[in-house]
Image (cartoon, rainbow, N blue to C red):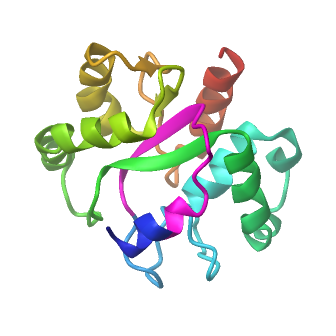
Amino acid sequence: MSDYDILRKQYKPNHIKILCIAESQPPAAGVASSRQFYRTDSLYHEDRLFTNTMRALYSDAADAVEADLKNNKEKWLRRFQKDGLYMTEALTSSLAHEVTKRQRQELITAHLPTLLDRVHKLAEPDTKIILIKSNVFDVAAKPLRAAGYHVLNHEFLDYPGRFNQRAYREKLAKIIAAN
């Protein structure tokens, strides 16, 4: 179990209503990354997955200044937890930016049994799943549905990178509102 998995467990709801699955774990603590969702030990300059998820889910976060969201990260993560939401990843290790889309999809495909096992341990019959990023959706949506899980998104949900933040927030809010 990684240090990030240990950190993430602090925010695991007693009952997961919605399980969000992103692509890969963040790099080690202290490394600048847009994927430091559960790290509260320091503020990360571009913590885009966290800030855009909160903005999409909570109307009082929608117009909040990024610094305010980060400074109150613990509060927002506890709210996320209280509402039955949980974030995990398809891959248990971090990927460098240089890894190609094809390589990422091959890795996710190779790790599908591990992902399905993790989802089985986390999900209950009424748990719904949201897949974040085209790589995850393209590879994992059909196998998860075939295994009996309720995947909410019917198309990929953009990763909130430098150019997809608005699309991510709009699509995520729409998925949540419809369910």
Q: Residue at x 47, y 85 (%)?
A: 30
Q: Residue furthest right?
A: 60
Rendering coords of residue 19 (x, y %) = 51, 37
Residue shown at 45% from the left, 33% from the top: 123
| Image quadrant in which the C terminus is located | top right
Pinpoint residue 142: horizontal percent, then vertical percent. 27, 18
Instruction: Give the number of marks.
Output: 0
Q: Residue at x 28, y 58 (%)?
A: 92
Please tell me in which quadrant of the rendered image residue 169 appears: top right
Res. 127 visible in picture: yes
Say above or below: 117 vs 74: above
Q: As drawn, is 67 to the left or to the right of 92?
A: right
Question: Relative to the observer, which residue lies in front, 5 or 65?
Answer: 5
Q: Is residue 83 magenta?
A: no
Q: In the picture, which quadrant includes the N terminus?
A: bottom left
> Does residue 51 appear left or right of residue 136 in this picture?
right
In this rendering, position of residue 155 left or right of residue 118: right
Segment colored magenta: 7-25
* Residue 42 location (% of width, % of height): 62, 82
Would residue 36 be seen by someone viewing this image from the given angle? Answer: no
Give the image quarter of residue 155: top left
| Side of 109 where 154 appears, left or right | right
User: Does the stretch in magenta take in 21?
Assistant: yes
